[in-house]
Image (cartoon, helix red, strand yellow):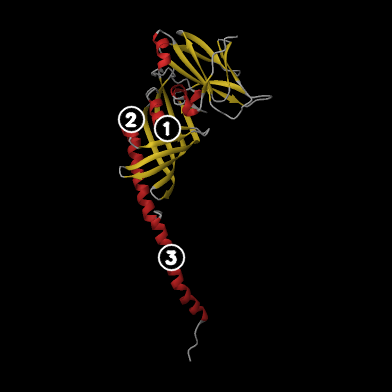
């Protein structure tokens, strides 16, 4: 009589269960759109999209670059605020032209959820940007960010960009700098004034917008000085508008260095005041703003929940 092997019985009994579980896992993966072949296909599609966007950026084809943005596209800033597609395009129209010679976006991590893709990307670029003295500076930049894409009938569209500035690196004329605010970039941005300011600019004045984003330091107010005269005090979420005659001015908060600015008639300039840690209290540092945030503070302050303060005439 042939004796049965108990281990063999267990194997045969468990084999159908293993097969069923395997089929279920495969079916669930395919239903969720995360099967290996599906992910590879989506990765290839996104690589094509990134390549097309990079080439359009180098050509200066703004319309093509914008075509990849969803109608409800937003950027989430590090402070938690959002910039909408409309606000972004308005701000970009005021930024001096940046000439790209290199632009490359690579996928480092990809997660598929239904018809959406969450993509961790690294972007590296080489470009020229106008400086205050009228020359062009040579820059290289690299950094990581996260992009949220959705598949539509018109192709992949970018809905959200967040985690900005992760592992960021910037060089200016061959030397590494901490941020773009450490570089004397041109900040005399062509910008259409708001209706209430148009007459004063047309009459020959310059407009300087100085702002401080909400930073959580509710009890610390930061001063703004023009030629050593205190003209405003900014809490978080405040901004002030200075109308100046053409000429040279020195602007600062309570922390050096100051910014020397030559203003021209019918021009708009942007500066940010940032709270810097210190003892016994933090102090304000005034920095030139390239325009992306400053123009939004001026044009659409409600989008960033900003409140205008009046000039302090008591000094």
Q: Tell me which residue sits at (30%, 44%) in the image.
A: 153
The image quadrant of residue 73 is: top left
Q: CA distance from mark 3 to mark 2?
A: 48 Å
Whether residue 66 is visible here, answered yes or no, is yes
Residue 39 percent coordinates (x, y): 39, 52
Compared with 183, 162 (above or below) is below
* Residue under numbered circle 3: 22
What is the number of the mark on residue 62? 2
- Work out whether mark 3 precedes mark 2 in sequence or the reverse, and give the earlier one: 3
Q: Which residue appears at 42% of the width and 10% of the height? A: 200
The relative height of residue 312 versus residue 179 in the rendered view (above or below) is above
Give the label on residue 84, or none. 1
Residue name at image x 42 percent, y 42 percent: 148
Q: Foreground mark, 1 or 2?
A: 1
SS class of the residue under badge 3?
Answer: helix
Q: Is residue 134 visible?
A: no
Q: Nearer the viewer, mark 3 or mark 1?
A: 1
Q: Is residue 228 above or below residue 126?
A: above
The tag earlier along the polypeptide, 1 or 2, is: 2
Label 2 SS: helix
The answer to the question of whether label 3 and label 1 lie on touching residues, with beta carbons closer than 8 A, is no
The front one of 206 and 248 is: 206
Q: Residues within 10 Å of mark 1 (few under 14, many from 20)?
A: some
Q: Nearer the viewer, residue 231 or 117?
A: 231
Going from N to C along the chain, the mark reached first, 3 or 1, is 3
Residue 67: x and y in percent read 32, 35
CA distance for labels 3 and 1: 44 Å
As measured in the structure, the alpha-carbon distance from the residue carrying label 1 to the one carrying label 2 is 17 Å
Q: Quadrant of residue 133?
A: top left
């Amino acid at each position: 009589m042939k004796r049965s092997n108990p281990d063999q019985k267990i194997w045969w009994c468990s084999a159908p269960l293993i097969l069923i579980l395997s089929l279920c896992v495969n079916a669930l993966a395919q239903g969720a759109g995360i099967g290996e072949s599906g992910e590879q296909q989506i990765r290839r599609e996104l690589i094509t999209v990134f390549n097309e966007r990079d080439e359009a950026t180098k050509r200066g084809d703004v319309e093509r670059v914008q075509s990849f943005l969803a109608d409800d596209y937003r950027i989430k800033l590090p402070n938690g605020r959002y910039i909408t597609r409309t606000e972004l395009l308005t701000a970009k129209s005021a930024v001096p032209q940046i000439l790209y010679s290199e632009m490359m976006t690579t996928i480092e991590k990809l997660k598929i959820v239904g018809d959406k893709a969450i993509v961790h990307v690294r972007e590296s670029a080489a470009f020229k940007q106008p400086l205050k003295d009228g020359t062009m500076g040579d820059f290289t930049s690299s950094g990581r960010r996260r992009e949220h894409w959705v598949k539509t009938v018109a192709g992949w569209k970018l809905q959200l960009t967040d985690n900005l500035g992760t592992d960021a690196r910037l060089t200016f004329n061959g030397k590494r700098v901490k941020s773009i605010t450490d570089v004397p970039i041109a900040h005399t941005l062509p910008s259409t004034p708001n209706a209430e300011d148009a007459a004063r600019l047309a009459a020959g004045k310059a407009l300087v917008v100085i702002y401080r984003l909400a930073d959580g330091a509710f009890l610390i107010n930061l001063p703004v000085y023009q030629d050593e005269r205190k003209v405003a005090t900014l809490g978080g979420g405040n901004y002030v508008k200075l109308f100046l005659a053409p000429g040279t001015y020195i602007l600062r908060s309570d922390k050096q260095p100051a910014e020397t600015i030559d203003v021209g008639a019918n021009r708009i300039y942007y500066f940010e005041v940032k709270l810097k840690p210190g003892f016994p209290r933090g102090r304000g540092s005034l920095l030139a703003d390239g325009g992306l945030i400053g123009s939004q503070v001026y044009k659409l302050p409600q989008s960033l929940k900003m409140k205008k303060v009046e000039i302090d005439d008591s000094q």
